[in-house]
Image (spheres, rainbow, N blue to C red):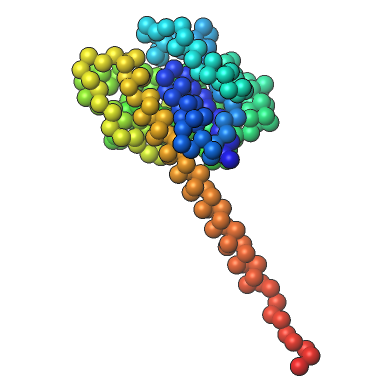
């Protein structure tokens, strides 16, 4: 079972965690930790992100409460601290991580730890990458540009802001006329969650095939260097 950590909040984080815990592929992943926004803390950049828009108190808490219901390790503080890095490395020990609406930048000691990678889900339109819609409020930028649809990009996390290598694009998600940023979070999150789990399964399967190929190569090399058997009794 693949150990996975989720860094997520609001509807995207909630739907992703639900898909991992209850979806058809739940037997393939073990959620080993959840980091989520505490909207009362300044370090989540509330004024620049989805939290600047009207929302219900329960919407801000729903990922934390979801994790608590399932007995999952939960973190709502800063992630760029030695204390959290130690918990992340020694207790969570993730094989793979994914961010889905998370208000803190992920630094190298975190994104370099999971052997299968650290990924992010980012709304944009398919095209040049890094996307012109990189940043903390992509749905507002898409609406301002009059876009009639969005996609969700799955990309590696690196030192930049939504600049890591692209992995895959989701299906097209329509932007209805008059839709708000919060509307788009609600509309797109189930699509993003299904897409993310499917792509993570592909990442895991590619890693398994690569490991098997390496084992076969080592076995073949070992056999090739074995001395030939000579029957001296003949």
Q: Is residue 12 visible?
A: yes
Left or right: residue 218 compared with residue 169: right
Query: Which residue sits at x=53%, y=19%?
Result: 66
Observer-nearest of 182 and 154: 182
9 in relation to 201, above or below: above
The spot of residue 85 in percent (x, y) is 64, 26
Residue in view at x 61 percent, y 67 percent: 221
Point out the image quarter for the N terminus: top right
Tell me the quarter of the picture where residue 162 sits. Answer: top left
Q: Nearer the viewer, residue 6 or 28?
A: 28
Residue 209 x/y as whole percent: 51, 53
Q: Is the residue 192 above or below the residue 58 in the image?
A: below
The answer to whether any part of residue 129 appears in the image is no
Q: Quadrant of residue 133?
A: top left
> In the rendered view, does 37 fall on the left or right side of 184?
right
Tally of marks: 0
Quadrant that contains the C terminus: bottom right
Residue furthest bottom as drawn: 234
Judging depth in this view, the residue of 116 and 14 nearest the camera is 14
On screen, residue 4 versus residue 125, left or right, reads right
User: Which residue ends up furthest to the right in the rendered image?
Assistant: 233
Q: Position of residue 141 (x, y in %)?
A: 29, 19
Instruction: Tell me which residue sits at (23%, 20%) in the image.
Output: 176
Quadrant position of residue 121: top left
């Amino acid at each position: 079972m693949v150990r996975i950590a989720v860094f997520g909040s609001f509807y995207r984080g909630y739907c992703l965690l639900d898909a991992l815990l209850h979806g058809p592929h739940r037997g393939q992943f073990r959620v080993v930790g959840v980091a989520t926004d505490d909207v009362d803390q300044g370090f989540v950049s509330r004024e620049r992100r989805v939290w600047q828009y009207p929302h219900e108190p329960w919407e801000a808490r729903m990922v934390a409460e979801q994790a608590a219901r399932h007995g999952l390790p939960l973190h709502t503080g800063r992630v760029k601290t030695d204390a959290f890095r130690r918990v992340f490395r020694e207790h969570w020990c993730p094989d793979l991580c994914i961010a889905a609406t998370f208000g803190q930048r992920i630094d190298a000691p975190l994104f370099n730890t999971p052997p299968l990678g650290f990924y992010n889900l980012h709304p944009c339109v398919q095209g040049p990458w890094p996307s012109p819609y990189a940043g903390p409020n992509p749905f507002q930028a898409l609406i301002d540009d009059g876009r009639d649809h969005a996609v969700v990009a799955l990309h590696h996390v690196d030192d930049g802001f939504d600049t890591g290598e692209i992995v895959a694009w989701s299906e097209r998600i329509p932007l209805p006329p008059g839709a708000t940023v919060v509307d788009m979070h609600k509309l797109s999150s189930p699509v993003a969650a299904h897409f993310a789990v499917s792509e993570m399964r592909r990442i895991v399967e590619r890693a398994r095939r690569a490991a098997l190929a390496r084992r076969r190569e080592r076995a073949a090399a070992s056999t090739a260097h074995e001395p030939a058997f000579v029957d001296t009794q003949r």
